[in-house]
Image (cartoon, grey):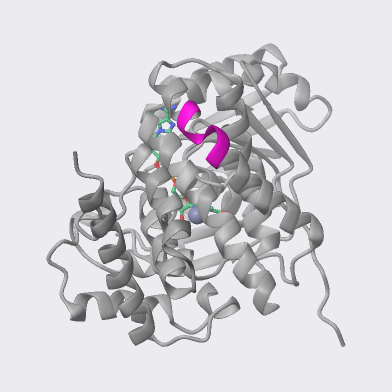
Amino acid sequence: MAAERVFISPAKYVQGKNVITKIANYLEGIGNKTVVIADEIVWKIAGHTIVNELKKGNIAAEEVVFSGEASRNEVERIANIARKAEAAIVIGVGGGKTLDTAKAVADELDAYIVIVPTAASTDAPTSALSVIYSDDGVFESYRFYKKNPDLVLVDTKIIANAPPRLLASGIADALATWVEARSVIKSGGKTMAGGIPTIAAEAIAEKCEQTLFKYGKLAYESVKAKVVTPALEAVVEANTLLSGLGFESGGLAAAHAIHNGFTALEGEIHHLTHGEKVAFGTLVQLALEEHSQQEIERYIELYLSLDLPVTLEDIKLKDASREDILKVAKAATAEGETIHNAFNVTADDVADAIFAADQYAKAYKEKHRK
Ligand SMILES: NC(=O)c1ccc[n+]([C@@H]2O[C@H](COP(=O)([O-])OP(=O)(O)OC[C@H]3O[C@@H](n4cnc5c(N)ncnc54)[C@H](O)[C@@H]3O)[C@@H](O)[C@H]2O)c1
Ligand SMILES: [Zn+2]
């Protein structure tokens, strides 16, 4: 029997300037007890505004400070607080780790889930899954849910004022989407939604990449100037909605498996964002595939224009030994990893591709040195 096509998505996605001030309108009739989760920094940036808006709409908010890691312990801690507060609505505000934690808490409570990303740093907002780490930040597992977020509210004014590095990271995460989805489509592999890719997911993932090549750099400059522009709106949608739908229903493959492998290493690499590690992982996937020099350099050029890492040195692994890289490659090819959705490769093949990607980018940098 042919495999089933599966496409999933959030119930509602809203993006624009100052949309968080409308949060109470969107929650009308849904419930009047919420738990709001944000880290210390994000409380100041958006958390308090959201709580004030909820109050105006007669909606109570239990305020929780997220401790920084999307771990099982943190989920349990916050779920207990939310249960005591009898929250019917969980509102996650912040970066990918906060949002992933909020999704897990909502799942524990069977609550309505609102996602408010304060940076376009990942494609976590729309998906029906969380990436769970140990308390020390080592990748543990994907946790899947029965539904996607009920509401995703993306305030582009807030995102325009977030660090440019976070937008660049989101572009890198989104640039992996088409590279990975097309490899899954080609091999007939499975997606995170539990089926084979739909034409819809294919179209969305491809459009995601086109949008990033067209507007990525302009959006990055917009955030440096802290302004909302059509280029920024386009890229925020690509980073968040197109990439989110595209990866989840289009398929993950090598780039994210290699990212997960890198989390197994100790040291400075832990200071890199998810998207930064994914940028290098994407170059590794491209090196595992058959592409022309021109095609690979198209990606390297865009990453460099966004100050993203393209070599092992850039990801703080200049002196990594073959042994270290094999450790990454082994984790990337562990049973159940997404690389198997599209590739029939060994850890040794992946280690070769890591060194190849590094060398391709070094050669490119050398050629373009002024
Ligand atoms: N569930 C999914 O589908 C999915 C998809 C992609 C990534 N992820 C996960 O997302 C996580 C990465 O997320 P991330 O890159 O956003 O990092 P993060 O959540 O670790 O950190 C984001 C940082 O940015 C800060 N921040 C957020 N908004 C800000 C603003 N407006 N101004 C200033 N600072 C701001 C936060 O305080 C925090 O320190 C990883 O754990 C990754 O596995 C999950
Ligand atoms: Zn990602």
Residue 369 is left or right of residue 284, and the answer is left
Q: Is residue 220 above or below residue 54?
A: below
Q: Main secondary structure of the magenta part?
A: helix
Residue 176 is left or right of residue 258, and the answer is right
Tell me where residue 285 appears, x and y as whole percent: 45, 68
Residue at image position (37%, 28%) is 163
Q: Is residue 323 above or below residue 139?
A: below
In the image, is residue 17 part of the stretch drawn in magenta? no
Name the one closer to the observer, 304 or 328.
Answer: 304
Residue occupying the far top of the picture: 56
Residue 344 is left or right of residue 83, and the answer is left
Q: Image quarter for residue 305? A: top left
Tell me where residue 176 appears, x and y as whole percent: 52, 56
Residue 74 is left or right of residue 356, and the answer is right
- Number of labels in the image equals 0
In the image, is residue 215 part of the stretch drawn in magenta? yes
Q: Image quarter for residue 85? A: top right
Residue 106 appears anywhere in the view: no
Q: Quadrant of the C terminus?
A: top left
Tell me where residue 157 appears, x and y as whole percent: 54, 18
Q: Is residue 319 above or below residue 303?
A: below
Q: Image quarter for residue 88? A: top right
Residue 281 appears anywhere in the view: yes
Q: Quadrant of the N terminus?
A: bottom right
Q: Is residue 205 above or below residue 95?
A: below
Name the one closer to the observer, 240 or 310.
Answer: 310
Tell me where residue 12 appears, x and y as whole percent: 77, 37
Residue occupying the far left of the picture: 319
Q: Which residues are magenta?
A: 213-218
Residue at image position (72%, 20%) is 24
Residue at image position (71%, 50%) is 204
